[in-house]
Amino acid sequence: MTSEIEFLSDHIPEPGEVYEITPGIQWIRMPLPFLLNHINLWMIEEEDGWVLIDTGINDERTKEIWRDIFGRVLNGKPLSRLVCTHAHPDHIGLGGWIHEEYGAELVITREEWAFGRMISMGATKDEKTYFDYFRRIGCDEENLNDLGSHILTADELYHDVPRRYERMRDGSTITIAGKQWEVIVGLGHAVEHACLYCQELDVLIAGDQVLPKITPTIMVHAPEPEADPLKDFLDSNEKLRRLPDTVTVLPSHNRPFTGLHARLDQYIAHHDERLDVVLNACDKPLSGMEVAGVLFTRELDFHGKFFASGEAMAHIRHLEYQGKLSRSIDTDGVERYLRA
């Protein structure tokens, strides 16, 4: 029987504080200007340098906090490596700046490097692709610019992702401070998200793949509108089942915890419940945006509408591929889904 989720500490670091959460691993919490208002980052000291895991977004406040931390903590050693779990802006947004200013070499999976590099260079400014997709899922013209503005300005949250990197891949290991860390790739939330597991320390740096309080955002995106990211997420999480339930999980949001297996079970139950809601709502034909309104009943800003639409489509696609929903296209080009 799996244990319940238990948090390691009631202490939450203030911005700029460096807090040892488990022997040898320093916890830093950076602010984010979103509803999800923080990200957890990790530093590990080696004999000849430091390793940083994830960065925070590209803004002046985060840079100022890093300058202060590095000035106090590095003790004359270089920041030698930057390991990024994935390429969302709160995780790699300052990757290029840290590489340029402090010389840290980027370590990341190949698909995440390519994804982050493209976004940081403005690839999401493809208005036609995104607007066509939002219209297809039922977004009206009044809300079109709001949804589009989230993704069309995404590059502003990134300093240019470095041109070169060292590749992590599923099942490979990297050495940090003399300890071996296994790379376990998770899918669904990101294209090739790297979790890092150290058996000797019994620690999992989980990134966004496993969070203690919220579920990672699982979205269908405009460039890959036929994807089934929910299946990818649930299937790839099963690779984490072999880890001991004693493992300390260091997540990117909220607090470090134990109870990995219980959390994986909760994800399955949560998405089963959401799938049932979508299936029952589609007793009449609904668009993706209409399903989003069923799943998310509270008032949403344009960021929230963007994520809600992607989450709705992830659950729709999963049901569609299971043969539980059928798809039709109206004369206005909007896809609608009906219980099969």
Image (cartoon, rainbow, N blue to C red):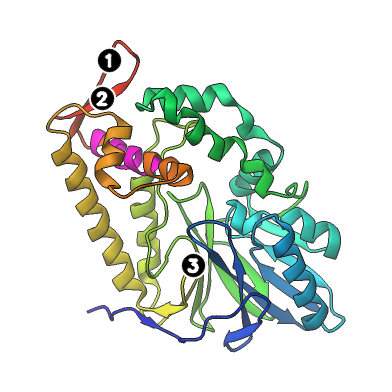
Labels 3 and 2 touching (C-beta < 8 A): no
Residue at 53% from the left image edge and 81% from the top image edge? 12
State the CA–CA distance, disc 3 to disc 2. 35 Å
Image quadrant in which the N terminus is located: bottom left
Helix, strand or loop for disc 3:
loop
Return the x and y of residue 133 as percentages of the image width and height. Answer: 44, 26
Tell which residue pokes out farthest to the top in this image: 331
Specify whether 30 is left or right of 282: right
The residue labelled by disc 1 is: 330
The residue labelled by disc 2 is: 336
Return the x and y of residue 158 as percentages of the image width and height. Answer: 69, 49
Quarter of the image holding residue 81? bottom right
Residue at 72% from the left image edge and 81% from the top image edge? 45
Tell which residue pokes out farthest to the right in this image: 76
| Label disc, if present, on residue 253 of the rendered structure | 3
Labels 2 and 1 touching (C-beta < 8 A): yes
Give the amino acid at mark 3: His
Q: Which residues are magenta?
A: 310-320
Helix, strand or loop for disc 2:
strand
Examine the rendered structure and indicate whether residue 34 appears above or below residue 322.
Answer: below
